[in-house]
Image (cartoon, rainbow, N blue to C red):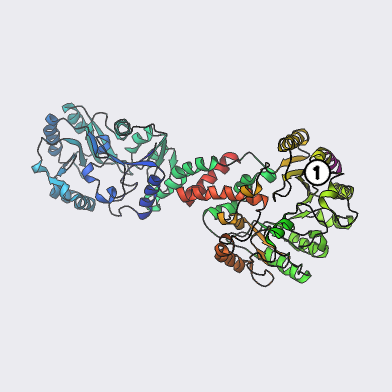
Amino acid sequence: MKIVFFDVDGTIYHVSQGISIQTKKSILKLKENGFHVAVCTSRSMPFIIDEIKEIGFDGYIASSGAYLMSNNNEKSFCIEKDSLNSIISIITQNGLSPILCGNQNIYCNKVELSQLYDDWIDLAIQQIGTHIVALSDFSYDEPINKICVKVPSDSPVKDNFDSLFNKIKEITSIDINEGRDEHNSLVEFEIVIKGCNKGTGIREYIRAFIDEPIEESWGVGDDYADIKMFEVVSNSIAMGNANDIVKSNAHYITKSFREEGITFACNKYILAKEAYQLIMSFTDISTNGILGYERFLIFDKSKWLDLFIQNKSIPPVQIDWQISSNCNLNCRWCVGKTTNSENQYQILKDSMDLDSVRTVANKIITTEINGLKTDTVQFSGFTGEPLLHWDLLREAIRILKNNGIRVGIFTNGSLLTSEKWETILKVESIHVSIDGGKDSWRRIKRPKNNIDYKIILDNIRGLSSLRSKIDSNTEINTGYTITNDNIMELEQTIIDLISAGADSICIKYDITGSEAISDVQQCEEITRECQNKYNSDRFKVLIMHDHKLDKTENRWKCGMGCFYRYFFCTIGSNGYIYPCDYQTLKECPEFGNISEQSFYDIYRTKDINWEDAVVNDSSFANVCPPFAEVINPYLQKLTKVIEQTGNEAVYFAIEMIRNKFK
């Protein structure tokens, strides 16, 4: 069980302001998350007014630990009856007015108190209502768990209370707890049986009423009396309006009562810790690079994730721009071709020219949403090869790079000829889908001319050689989709790529389901052996995902929702915005032409129409992009934590992860 104890005055409540709506919501949010929430106050039980009770606390520790209640079970520690008369006499003889606190009623001289003190007393008397009884009507048979005394500023014994306290302590075994203001002047004191305080009250409350182990305990308060509470809980929070001594005894400090300190404390500390544990249960922080999607979101693209958590609009982190839907190869397992044939759809026309490319590029660099701009533009092709339209690609690269946009290129490598190298070495990365070795490459890629494996390697080698001469930082990455044809050539291909100067190989399995692996175990053994043997600081051997026997069953489906769409955007070869880079066919839903409309307007149309156009359309058989396959389940889990603990709690939990694992 996780349990939270709240002080009342100056913490969740102010006598002239009551309890804020946000405070009530925050305490209820704790209950929704399985926390046991209890009041721990110096107030006696009759003084815990209906506004406090209506929140629905699971229990109460009142009278500074002298009275306990939970689920209609109660326990109290009362001052000896034989001593009460003597204590009352000493107090009144010194010009003070005692307030006797019982389990059901409070006894005092209302008129005298109203005359002696400020408006607070009048408000208190009004709020207690019928539970406040004249001192003259007190029956010594009723148990009293606390005597409270307010000290007026002109009290004749104000500077000599030690003598008064000693006289009272001579009567019976009691403790006297002092209440002081910001100037350290005594403003009140309370008398309880010896050993009673908020700390002992919490221990006894847990012993008497809690029948399961306590995983974690919290205490929130603002007064000296709360220090005893802080000493027995595992996590203590001082209000911003507490004095420095109280703050110095707390683990954390929240905002003041007037600044909604309880809401801040619940979100930043209590629920954030809960959210942190939930998030870390499904988050891998150790993996970096292309496979580390958690680190990508939490660290690399933190500003985007923070706004997503707070349900605010964001521009896409990355735009996938498909300049061409046509290709010079005919890959056997091509995702675009498979999707096209499954749906009997048509590929898009390549209708962009230099003017439209310039228009799109300039809109990308000028669009800003909530202080963020798109970080990266990736040139790729669902059914096409971007290098087919070199003049368009080169112009787009020029504009984007001159304006600080990161650029990546996905290509089959066959058109990666020497006249393009200098321009390509200005971008951040190029990914060559090599997908086969010396013998298997032509069978898999099925080129329409005499292009072969050696030409691809020579292009990579030439690009790498020029990179070292001009001191470029462009990453040269490669991809290798495993088939029955090429698995036995994987190791030699890695050796060839290292020799050619590539930086990595990402090993993948066919996600269309058209290339069934005959010996899965052998395949996985070979890929792992290659990774163990050749992965190094110089050359990375990455495995994108494990083999799955039934790709159809293991696909993420649009009807399950899409979180990938918030972070990634796709421009088709006709200039229209599409759902993702794996849905750019003629019959796929589109949301507007970027050459004619603003990104902002298209994003709004995309959000408004998404459910009807994508989620509720079961007619389209699609495959999710590999990155979407991992990001969607992750963000779905994160969204559930947001729903459970709240936006702010998750925001602070992510902040905790960054601080711990940076």
Where does the N terminus fall, quadrant-wise? top left
**Res 371 quadrant in image:** bottom right
Residue at left 39%, top 33%? 214
Residue sitting at 91 percent across and 54 percent down? 450
Question: Residue 655's spot in the image, x, y percent?
Answer: 54, 45
Which residue is under mark 1?
Answer: 485
Left/right of residue 513 with respect to residue 40 in the rendered view: right
The residue closer to the viewer here, 481 or 106, is 481
Q: Left or right of 106: which side holds 395? A: right
Residue drawn at x 64%, y 52% as measured from the top left: 628
- Dot 1, how many residues are within 10 Å of its Cα: few (below 14), some (14-19), or many (20+)? some
Which stretch appears magenta? 495-502
Q: Position of residue 474 (x, y in %)?
A: 78, 50
Q: Position of residue 303 (x, y in %)?
A: 59, 53
Left or right: 310, with 325 as reference point: left
> Would you say residue 498 sits in the magenta stretch?
yes
Count the marks: how many? 1
Question: Which corner quadrant of the image does residue 601 belong to?
Answer: bottom right
Percent from the top left, x then y, of residue 74?
23, 36
Q: Secondary structure at mark 1?
A: loop
Pick out the residue farthest to the right: 450
**Is residue 309 depicted above or below 347 in this figure?**
above
User: In which quarter of the view is residue 381 placed?
Assistant: bottom right
Q: What amino acid is found at the position of numbered circle 1 in the picture?
A: Asp
Q: Is residue 107 magenta?
A: no
Prevailing secondary structure of the magenta residues: helix
Q: Nearer the viewer, residue 598 or 385?
A: 385
- Quadrant holding the C terminus: top right
For residue 153, say whether it is visible. no
